[in-house]
């Protein structure tokens, strides 16, 4: 079965610094989703990537999907305390099954 | 405002008791999902429903049951057969099964007394 591995598991950065979170799949990704979660709350959708080499940005967050569609990265530029939380990647197990699997999450702390 | 409402936010279960978690959405989405989240782990799929009166088991369905009598409602019952129910439970829904961007409720934290 497909698995998603996120790295690092946790990250502490100084405000203003850049950071990258990675999500690696054991199989080809049909769709890759990035979500953010505050502790004890629901997940907030950030971005979805489908095509190899695709890159999307929203404010200071950029997500990329590699050409082979087995790895995605989430890059935050000039981090702020508001970026703190848990970032989870999710992936479609195959096209049109309606099911997603999720990585274990990366906890980000941003020190002011 | 459109969205997904989960209730209650906190729930306590006694030994041998069944408890039901509520999930309601007014987004007119066909598909709904239940996930379990344990500390340091990602989400694991319990049950999902792509249409009213139909649902499928996810990866960890044992000890849980669901119903989908109305499009907007997808309640989850944690039965006494679930021996380790303490977790954070999340409900989600999606309009488009192909793109499958899922939108989540705020979650219910279940603890055992």
Image: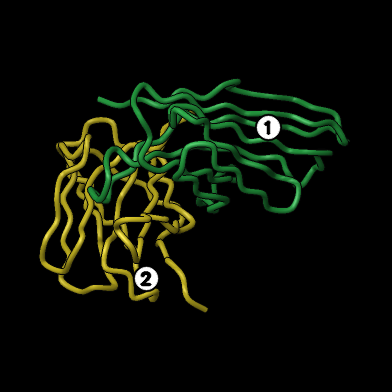
Q: Quadrant of residue A61?
A: top right
- Indicate the quadrant where residue A31 lies: top left
Closer to the camera, B5 or A88?
A: A88
Question: Mark 2: which secondary structure?
Answer: strand
Looking at the rendered image, the quarter that the N terminus of chain A falls into is top left
Whether residue B79 is situated above or below residue B70 in the rendered picture: above
The number of callouts visible is: 2
Examine the rendering and report whether any part of residue B113 can be seen: no
Q: Which residue is mark 1?
A: A108
Same chain for labels 2 and 1? Say yes or no. no
Asked whether residue B111 is in view, the answer is: yes
The spot of residue B87 in percent (x, y) is: 39, 38
Residue lying at the far bottom in this picture: please name it. B1
Judging by colour alone, the chain drawn in yellow in this rendered image is: B
Q: Position of residue B49 (x, y in %)?
A: 20, 58
Quadrant in the picture for residue B66:
bottom left
- Using residue A112 as the reference point, say whether residue A108 is left or right of it: left
| Residue linked to disc 2 | B25
The foreground one among B28 and B16 is: B28
């Amino acid at each position: 079965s497909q698995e998603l591995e996120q790295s690092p598991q946790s990250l502490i950065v100084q405000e203003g610094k850049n950071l990258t979170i990675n999500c690696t799949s054991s199989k080809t990704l049909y769709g890759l989703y990035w979500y953010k979660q505050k502790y004890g709350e629901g997940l907030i959708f950030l971005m979805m990537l489908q095509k190899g080499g695709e890159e999307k940005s929203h404010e200071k967050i950029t997500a990329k999907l590699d050409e082979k569609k087995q790895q995605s990265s989430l890059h935050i530029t000039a981090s702020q305390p508001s970026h703190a939380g848990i970032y989870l990647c999710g992936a479609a197990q195959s096209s049109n099954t309606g099911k997603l699997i999720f990585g274990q999450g990366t906890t980000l702390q941003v020190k002011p | 405002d459109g969205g997904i409402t989960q209730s209650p936010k906190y729930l306590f279960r006694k030994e041998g008791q069944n408890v039901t978690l509520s999930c309601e959405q007014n987004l007119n989405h066909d598909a709904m999902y239940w996930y379990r989240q344990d500390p340091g782990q990602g989400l694991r799929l319990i049950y999902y429903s792509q249409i009213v009166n139909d649902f499928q088991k996810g990866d960890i369905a044992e000890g849980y049951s669901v119903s989908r009598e109305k499009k907007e409602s997808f309640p989850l019952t944690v039965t006494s057969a679930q021996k380790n129910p303490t977790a954070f439970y999340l409900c989600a829904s999606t309009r488009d099964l192909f793109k499958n961007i899922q939108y989540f409720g705020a979650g219910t934290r279940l603890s055992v007394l």
